């Protein structure tokens, strides 16, 4: 068991890089969607560059990090199966499942944009970008507090954060409408 902390460190490193990819890819989607609506030659030049950036981020950082974070998480649970008896861990695993669903949905958007299929607006992607943030907050609160009661307050905090993000999003949208260069 002396290597438990090494496995835990590797798990955390890959969780961080996984989230980094999930935070950045929707931002690239915003730029891809906006580039799609530009006139030629900007549309092609920007579109090609953004597709390449998204492809590298998605397949070199995000997917490998997701897989490695999951492998190390399973390894940790094998080493410490007692965690599976904890109520907070059950809730955390639900959020991890939501993160995986978010990743799969993001992959669908990725494939669409790689094929020049634009079904969502750049504003939608700006809002969608916050999905991983909510999950990160929930998981961090659960892991740190490790209490079935305290995680409820953490989840309430997530909804308050969501409300604040929505307000911030609307304010930013108004600023962008008044000043397109913002």
Image: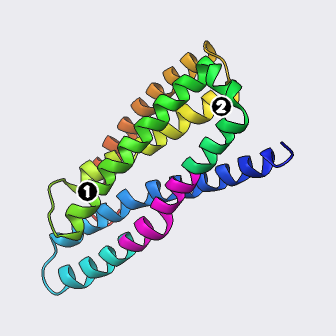
Q: Give the magenta range.
A: 55-69
Secondary structure of residue under mark 2: helix
Q: Is residue 148 left or right of residue 57?
A: right
Q: Earlier in the sequence, mark 1 or mark 2?
A: 1
**Residue 152 in the image: x percent, y percent?**
54, 16
- In the rendering, at what x and y percent does residue 13 appear? 66, 55
Residue drawn at x 44%, y 54% as measured from the top left: 22
Against 9, residue 96 (above or below) is above
- Furthest residue in direction top, as rendered: 149
Horizontal relation, residue 27 to residue 91: left or right: left
Q: In this rendering, does residue 33 appear at all?
A: no
Label 1: few (<14), some (14–19) or many (≥20) C-alpha neighbours in 10 Å: many
User: Label 1 belongs to which residue?
Assistant: 109
Q: Which mark is residue 93?
A: none
> How far across and how far down the image is residue 170, in percent?
31, 41
Classify the position of the N terminus by image quarter: top right
Task: Give the distance between the C-alpha atoms of the residues marked 1 and 2, in whole angstroms.
Answer: 30 Å
Q: Does residue 46 belong to the magenta stretch?
A: no
Q: Nearer the viewer, residue 74 or 50?
A: 74
Circles 1 and 2 in contact, beta carbons < 8 Å: no
Q: Residue at x 72, y 38 (%)?
A: 79
Q: Is residue 149 above or below residue 103?
A: above
Q: Is residue 68 magenta?
A: yes
Q: Secondary structure at mark 1?
A: helix
Residue beneath disc 2 = 143
Residue at position x 22%, y 65% in the image:
113
Tell me how many marks there are: 2
Residue in the foreground of this view, choosing between 28 and 69? 69
Residue nearer the viewer, 41 or 81: 81
- Residue 99: percent from left, percent from top: 43, 41
Q: Is residue 88 above or below residue 141?
A: above
Any part of residue 109 in sight: yes
């Amino acid at each position: 068991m002396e290597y438990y902390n090494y496995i835990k460190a590797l798990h955390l490193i890959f969780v961080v890089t996984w989230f980094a990819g999930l935070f950045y890819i929707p931002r690239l989607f915003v730029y891809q969607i906006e580039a799609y609506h530009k006139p030629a030659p900007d549309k092609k030049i920007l579109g090609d560059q953004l597709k390449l950036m998204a492809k590298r981020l998605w397949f070199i950082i995000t997917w490998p990090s997701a897989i490695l974070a999951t492998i190390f998480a399973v390894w940790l649970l094998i080493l410490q199966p007692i965690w599976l008896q904890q109520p907070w861990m059950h809730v955390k695993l639900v959020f991890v499942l939501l993160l995986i669903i978010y990743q799969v949905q993001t992959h669908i958007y990725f494939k669409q944009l790689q094929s020049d299929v634009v079904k969502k607006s750049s504003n939608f992607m700006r809002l969608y970008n916050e999905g991983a943030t909510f999950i990160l907050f929930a998981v961090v609160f659960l892991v740190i507090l490790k209490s079935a009661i305290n995680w409820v307050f953490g989840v309430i905090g997530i909804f308050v954060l969501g409300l604040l993000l929505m307000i911030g999003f609307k304010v930013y949208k108004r600023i962008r409408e008044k000043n397109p260069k913002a």
